[in-house]
Amino acid sequence: MRETELPNSSLAVQNAHPQTYTILHVDDDAASLLLAESSLEDAGFTVVQAQNGQEALKQFVDQSPDLIIMDAMMPVMDGFDAIAEIRRSPGGEYLPILMITGLEDLESITRAYDEGATDFLTKPINYLTLPFRVRYMLRAKQTADALRLSESKLDSAQRIARLGHWECQDKAQEFFWSKEFSRVMGLPESVRTGSIDSFLSAVVNRDKQSVLTRLLRVFETCRAFNMEFCVGSDNEASERTVRLEVHPHFDVRGCCTHVFGTVQDITERTNAQQQIHNLAYYDLVTGLPNRAQLYERLEYALKRARRKNTEFALLFLDLDHFKQVNDTLGHDAGDELLQQVSSRLKVVVRDTDSVSRSPDDEEETKQQHTVARLGGDEFVVLLGELNRGGDAARVAERIAAVIGKPYTINDTKVSVTTTIGISVFPMDGGDSETLMKHADVAMYHAKEQGRNGYQFYSRKIHEAALARFSMEADLKAAIENNELTLMFQPKVDLLDHKVVGMEALARWTHKTNGPVNPAEFIKIAEETGLIVPLGRWVLEAACKQMQAWIEAGREPFSVAVNCSPVQFERGNIIDDIDHALATSGLDPRLLEVELTESLFLEDIEAGIELLRQMKVLGIHVSVDDFGTGFSSLSYLKRLPVDKLKIDQLFIKDLEIDPGDAAIVLSIITLAHNLGLSVIAEGVETEGQMGMLERYRCNEAQGYFISHPLSSEEATEWLSNRELQLLSKQVSGF
């Protein structure tokens, strides 16, 4: 229908300008057609005519009229059949049809409405009032069209929002609902009414009773409420979550006459909320609770333990040598290992109920056991309740035993162990942070004792940890503020006893505690990564000092710097060496880098490649502490090194232990056969020097030759050493 404003008065009908409304008049009486045409055209309508139902169908298709005036009785096809055909045709469903009939019996009138007539007139017709009747019907159609459009928009909006509405009277005896309600609830869309049983038929079994109870109660309390439940089959994959809003309706007397409300499919929202919750509270790799959820459960365990005056324990786990798996097999393999470890931990914790539960509170205790992943290779097990703190040790033993069993990852057998620290409430702390910190401290102490074990927290451990943390902070500040010093220990040639090199040694004098044992602060530096900036400083300082001696006229000799494996793992040792040589101007041939065997044990091929890169720089490389690393001799011939350094462990009892003597002689012979020179460290007696000379060891260093010296002391010592050698040469003549 074409939209235009409809006049509301007779004057408007008579004086209106011609409009685009088209009226199809169907009648087999020519006089009726003529009279109606004159009246309608005077009112501004366009009129088309047909003399029977068959012609009417053709005009309906050709002209698309806005309204039809249809006579009832006609030849070929009467008005009743014509109306029925039009209603079945596209565009004819809501078209206004005014039936004209000379029949006044109720049966004909009923048939007219049954076939689809909008209204009817009986003959004789008052043609002066006919235009008003037509305009009324057009206005009614316009209103109906607007209503249908509004309903369509509402239905579309409800479909988009997945929101259906409903109404219920007579204390939930009969429900009326919208089309979208049917879609949301999973009911047939053609069914728009039903009993409360129809309503509940879509609800999953576990929620039926609660929905029924709340619906019936609203008639008693007359209070609005909302709730969420699931619809569909009792299968999580096909279930949908629905939110029900219920409101009572009150009459003028304040009585609740019926209730109404909405249902909305909120499945996507709840799924998104669940995903957000999982991201916030669960670890993505293992699916275990993360740090945030662990702390929530820990807070609950604290409240419960205080209320019931019970104990619980925290087990802080760290996987030993996990980094090797990542480095050798890749991070995907590392993730797979973490997942397998997680599965084993969950099984162990489930099996610990008989150890840790209270007999009268078994179910609640089970719910309070938690396995969480903090990140990296760190896990925490919360044992929600213990009969006694010592029971945590039995759980730790089970965990260590299970974790220590081999794993298969990508057809590769992998073995890891775990180190566990344990804190117990209330002895080891009264809040979450303290208990976590103390369990971590205990774990660290257990690692110091050799890994693959467990350790309870104690005050002694805590004090040691505090001292260590303090030293770590002080060491970091000392490195940053250039507060360390460099000492030099001479190395001599055992053939002519001339100085052939100096080993650079870092020393630290604490501002308040005085000199710190190198073994102590070097260990801390390696564990914290501070060895990287510390090693970089030693390289630069040693090269600069050696170049300074050369520029002062001293005969060139090598300077040796010991490098930690950590410098290769966390830093860029090649760049550090290159930078130290460039800034000092030292000849690369005068720098000797000492490396321990452990650097090559984990990945021999990577170690060989690293040595080749170092040799490209032109420096010399020696293997430090040789004989203590249990390296395969088959690899030794492949290592591009220049020198082996015999560990002082074998030199200490060289004069009295035939076994040590045999080992030292074997190392020297092996090295010479491989074209390598040998240096012995820790030489403290003349007898040791003599034996090394007889074994044809190339070089030696130790207290018998000289203690470590400052640069000033070393300068003086070198001068004195030259005088002594010159004196011996003169006396020899």
Image: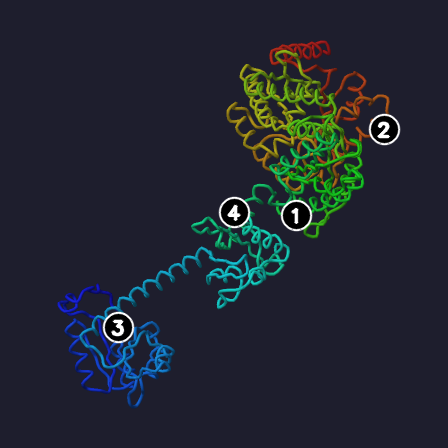
Q: On the rendered image, what quadrant is the N terminus found in?
A: bottom left
Q: Quick check: marks 1 and 4 in contact, CB under 8 Å?
A: no
Q: Which residue is mark 1?
A: 336
Nearest to N terminus: mark 1 or mark 3: 3
- Name the image quarter holding residue 207: bottom right
Q: Which residue is mark 4?
A: 223
Q: How far separated are the C-alphas under marks 2 and 1?
A: 47 Å
Position of residue 416 measured from the top left corner of the image (x, y, whole percent): 73, 41
Q: On the rendered image, what quadrant is the C terminus found in?
A: top right
Q: Nearer the viewer, mark 1 or mark 3?
A: 3
Q: How far separated are the C-alphas under marks 3 and 4?
A: 50 Å
Q: Residues within 10 Å of mark 2 (few under 14, many from 20)?
A: few
Q: How far separated are the C-alphas under marks 1 and 3?
A: 73 Å
Q: Quick check: marks 2 and 3 in contact, CB under 8 Å?
A: no
Q: Nearer the viewer, mark 2 or mark 1?
A: 1
Q: Nearer the viewer, mark 2 or mark 4?
A: 4
Q: Residues within 10 Å of mark 1 (few under 14, many from 20)?
A: some
Circle 2: residue type: Gly
Where is 530 relative to 674, above or below? Answer: above
Position of residue 653 measured from the top left corner of the image (x, y, whole percent): 83, 22
